[in-house]
Image (spheres, helix red, strand yellow):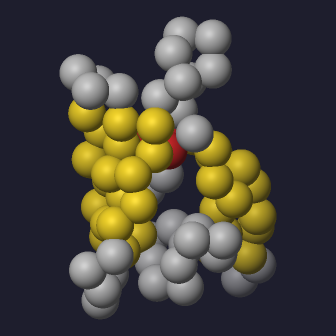
């Protein structure tokens, strides 16, 4: 099993992904709020949340480095 590092938009992140620049814990849930233009990323085993912003139609959601086991 190899770990792949890639950059993904906040709305493309899935449970189980690890965002090494944000938290060592895997993502437990991503809640995309299109009305307010944000995405809330929750992590397993912690109360830490990361909010990602939407930069508008030209930019889309904020991107993060993601480690995904393949």
Residue at image location 63% in from the left, 53% down from the top: 64
Residue 45 in view in this figure: yes
29 to 60, vertically: above or below = below
- Which quadrant holds the N terminus? bottom right
Q: Position of residue 7 (x, y in %)?
A: 71, 50
Residue at image location 45% in from the left, 45% down from the top: 52
47 to 59, vertically: above or below = below
Residue at image location 30% in from the left, 86% down from the top: 46
Q: Position of residue 16 (x, y in %)?
A: 44, 71
Q: Position of residue 17 (x, y in %)?
A: 51, 67
Q: Is residue 54 left or right of residue 7?
A: left
- Which quadrant holds the C terminus? bottom right
Q: Is residue 44 left or right of residue 17?
A: left
In the image, 14 versus 65, the foreground residue is 65
Q: Is residue 3 left or right of residue 29?
A: right
Q: Is residue 22 left or right of residue 30?
A: right
């Amino acid at each position: 099993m190899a770990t792949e590092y890639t950059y993904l938009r906040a709305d493309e992140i899935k449970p189980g992904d690890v965002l090494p620049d944000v938290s060592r814990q895997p993502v437990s849930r991503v809640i995309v709020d299109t009305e307010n233009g944000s995405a809330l990323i929750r992590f397993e085993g912690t109360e830490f949340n990361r909010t990602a912003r939407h930069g508008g139609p030209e930019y889309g959601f904020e991107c993060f480095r993601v480690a995904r086991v393949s």
